Image (tube, rainbow, N blue to C red):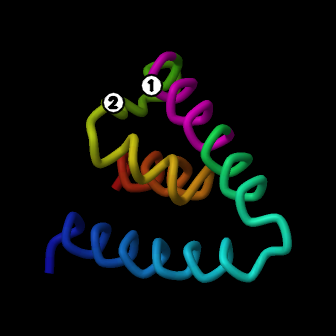
Amino acid sequence: MDTEMIFRTLCGAVAVIMVIYYFRREKKLLSFLTGAVTGGAALFIVNKYGLMIGADIPLNIFNTVGSIVLGVPFVIFLVIMNFL
């Protein structure tokens, strides 16, 4: 099993966990928007300044949707997977 398949499987599992988390929150929309904004900002920062640490994370549809739905942990996971 290659690292990309492991990565996509883990992202799918985490996406399900995050959806359950958002639905259990009292302020569902505010919680989702906060996670989406911070995840998008983290992805943008890593894309813009990631070459300084050796992380070249492109802005594609998978990374963008993942960072919006899953937030900052997804971006951190992308950087870690970039080094493997």
Are the two marked residues, 1 and 2, in contact with CB atoms closer than 8 angstroms?
yes
* Image quadrant containing the C terminus: bottom left
Report the mark closest to the observer, 1 or 2: 2
The numbered disc on residue 47 is 1
The N terminus - image quarter: bottom left
| Amino acid under disc 2 | Leu
Q: Amino acid at mark 1?
A: Asn
Query: Can you tell which quarter of the image residue 70 is in?
Result: bottom right
| Mark sitting earlier along the chain (1/2) | 1
Compared to residue 77, the image places residue 56 above or below, namely above
Magenta-colored stretch includes residue 39: yes
Picture disc at residue 59: 2
- Whether 54 is drawn above or below 49: the answer is below
Residue closer to the observer: 68 or 53: 68
Looking at the image, residue 31 sits to the left or right of residue 23; the answer is: right
- What residue range appears in magenta? 38-48
Instruction: Please check the rendered image and state whether residue 24 is part of the magenta-colored stretch, yes or no.
Output: no
**In 3D space, how far apart are the residues under numbered discs 1 and 2 (Cα atoms)?**
7 Å
Label 2 secondary element: loop
Label 2: few (<14), some (14–19) or many (≥20) C-alpha neighbours in 10 Å = some
